[in-house]
Amino acid sequence: AQTVTQSQPEMSVQEAETVTLSCTYDTSESDYYLFWYKQPPSRQMILVIRQEAYKQQNATENRFSVNFQKAAKSFSLKISDSQLGDAAMYFCAYRSSTYSGAGSYQLTFGKGTKLSVIP
Amino acid sequence: NAGVMQNPRHLVRRRGQEARLRCSPMKGHSHVYWYRQLPEEGLKFMVYLQKENIIDESGMPKERFSAEFPKEGPSILRIQQVVRGDSAAYFCASSPGGENSPLHFGNGTRLTVT
């Protein structure tokens, strides 16, 4: 079974600075997807960025980018020019790529990192 | 295009009562997923449904929990004889299907069992 570990329960960053959130995962599969979701106090789960494991290039979405290290099974999220609206819980998630029976469409989430942005 | 709609947003039930949580997927989405989030935890998969079919219920507790996604109307997650341990946020997500389809989540229903 796949597991996702986020080792930083809480992080803080000064407004306009850069912060990196860590995520490691364990899997025996070679093809899969990785995601970062943001959960603000409103509770909605918002997709921030996604990465296909077969792509070597790191995904980027505006101020958000990832450092995907497949061999190390590491998938960190970098937030540049942090804004007050970035304050939220951030969840790393894993999903299998191909249908292989029960569980293959499931997202496996880490426990989350609470990010605070200091004005 | 409205997003995934869940209601109610908050639900309070006494122990032993039934809880019904509703989810209307995004327009054009025929795949629905239910997840549960316990306090201080990430979301955990419960069940995956397509119209009138349960595809994967490997995350559902064996007793008291059931889910459906009828041909017409919203998907329903039903919890019978609720206990305090059922208190959690329940999230619904939908997708149009296909391996590359991202999930779109609703705002969740927070169930409190007193």
Image (tube, helix red, strand yellow):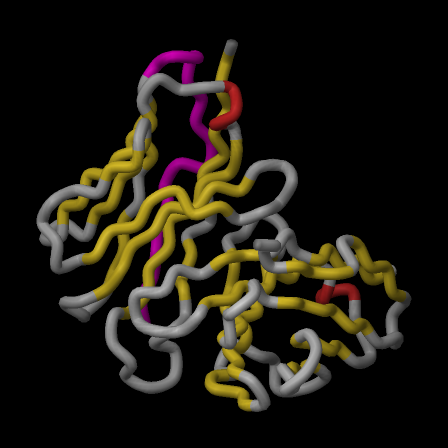
Q: Residue at x 39, y 42 (%)?
A: A48
Q: Which residues are magenta?
A: A1-17
**Mark count:** 0
- In the image as oriented, which residue stretches furthest toward the top? A119
Q: Residue at x 40, y 73 (%)?
A: B97
Work out whether residue A59 or residue B113 is closer to the camera in this orientation and state it.
A59
Work out whether residue A46 or residue B59 is closer to the camera in this orientation and state it.
A46
Q: Where does the image place residue A39, in percent across and percent down from the top left? A: 53, 42
Q: Where does the image place residue B33, in percent across and percent down from the top left? A: 53, 71
Is residue A29 positioned above or below A35 on the image?
below
Q: Where does the image place residue B55, in percent across and percent down from the top left? A: 47, 86
Q: Is residue A10 magenta?
A: yes
Q: Where does the image place residue B68, in percent across and percent down from the top left? A: 65, 84
Q: Is residue B18 left or right of residue A25?
A: right
Give the quarter of the figure containing the N terminus of chain A.
bottom left
Is residue A58 positioned above or below A16 on the image?
below
Q: Residue at x 51, y 66 (%)?
A: B94
